[in-house]
Image (cartoon, rainbow, N blue to C red):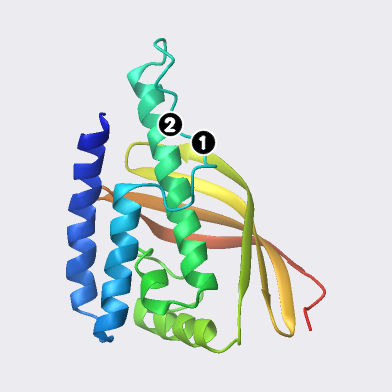
């Protein structure tokens, strides 16, 4: 897929995101910032130039390999953006990374889960998040299962969690459909 077609696909997802943002109660400044973040993610990588990009110089690369490389870049960008929104304690942007069909563990409804997440994101003075070891367990055109380690720290608490997420692509945008904490290790808490 050429870059302009990829941008058009992402733009379709952006339009859906903007419509979703309009339904949230927030200040105009917050809404503009979130639209800016979404637009930045649509027009270029969110997580910087150090991320692997598809290899367009290899003429023996098949169309399937090229598509798979693009999906991996898109998913890395989404997970990086999700972690950045969490660390920045930007509730609305963080929650936009989740599918409307998200299946939260331990909650009977998405509304209860969302209220709990908002409270947990707002409470700490600051949050530090780092990711490592992203693995693609399965990767298909509109569905991917990934695993990675997430290090979380806030005043008085820190842990390292092995996460597994199922992401689904709809309207050209990857979103988190489900997530599971496979292993949690408590770390020494920062002061």
**Residue 133 — which label?**
none
- On the image, which quarter does residue 37 sit in? bottom left
Give the CA distance from mark 1 to mark 2.
9 Å
| Viewer can see residue 101 | no
Between 50 and 131, the one nearer to me in the picture: 50
Between 117 and 130, the one nearer to me in the picture: 130
Quick one: SS at disc 1? loop
> CB atoms at circles 1 and 2 under 8 Å apart?
yes
Q: Is residue 190 above or below residue 18?
A: below
- On the image, which quarter does residue 56 sit in? top left
Q: Position of residue 129 (x, y in %)?
A: 61, 66
Q: Residue at x 47, y 85 (%)?
A: 116
- Quadrant that contains the C terminus: bottom right
Q: Position of residue 73 (x, y in %)?
A: 44, 40
Q: Is residue 114 above or below residue 62?
A: below
Q: Is residue 107 left or right of residue 37?
A: right
Q: Is residue 81 above or below residue 5?
A: below
- On the image, which quarter does residue 142 sit in? top left
Sequence-wise, which precedes: disc 1 or disc 2?
1
Q: Position of residue 27 (x, y in %)?
A: 27, 86
Q: Position of residue 184 (x, y in %)?
A: 71, 65
Q: Nearer the viewer, mark 1 or mark 2?
A: 1
Q: Which residue is mark 1?
A: 52
Q: Which residue is mark 2?
A: 69
Q: Is residue 134 above or below residue 187?
A: above
Few, some or many C-alpha atoms within 10 Å of disc 2 (few <14, some 14-19, many ≥20)? some
């Amino acid at each position: 897929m050429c870059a302009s077609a990829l941008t058009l696909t992402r733009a379709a997802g952006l339009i859906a995101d903007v419509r979703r943002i309009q339904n949230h109660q927030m200040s105009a400044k917050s809404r503009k910032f979130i639209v800016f973040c979404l637009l930045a993610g649509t027009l270029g990588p969110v997580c910087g130039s150090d991320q692997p990009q598809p290899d367009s110089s290899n003429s023996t690369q098949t169309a399937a390999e090229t598509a798979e490389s693009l999906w991996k870049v898109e998913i890395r960008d989404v997970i990086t953006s999700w972690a950045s929104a969490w660390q920045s304690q930007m509730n609305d942007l963080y929650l936009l990374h989740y599918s409307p069909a998200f299946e939260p563990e331990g909650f009977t409804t998405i509304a209860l889960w969302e209220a709990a997440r908002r409270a947990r994101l707002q409470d700490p003075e600051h949050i530090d998040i780092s990711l490592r070891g992203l693995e693609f367990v399965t990767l298909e055109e509109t569905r991917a299962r990934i695993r990675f380690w997430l290090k979380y720290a806030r005043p008085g608490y820190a842990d390292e969690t092995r996460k597994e997420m199922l992401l689904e692509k709809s309207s050209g945008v990857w979103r988190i459909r489900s997530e599971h904490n496979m292993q949690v290790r408590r770390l020494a808490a920062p002061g």
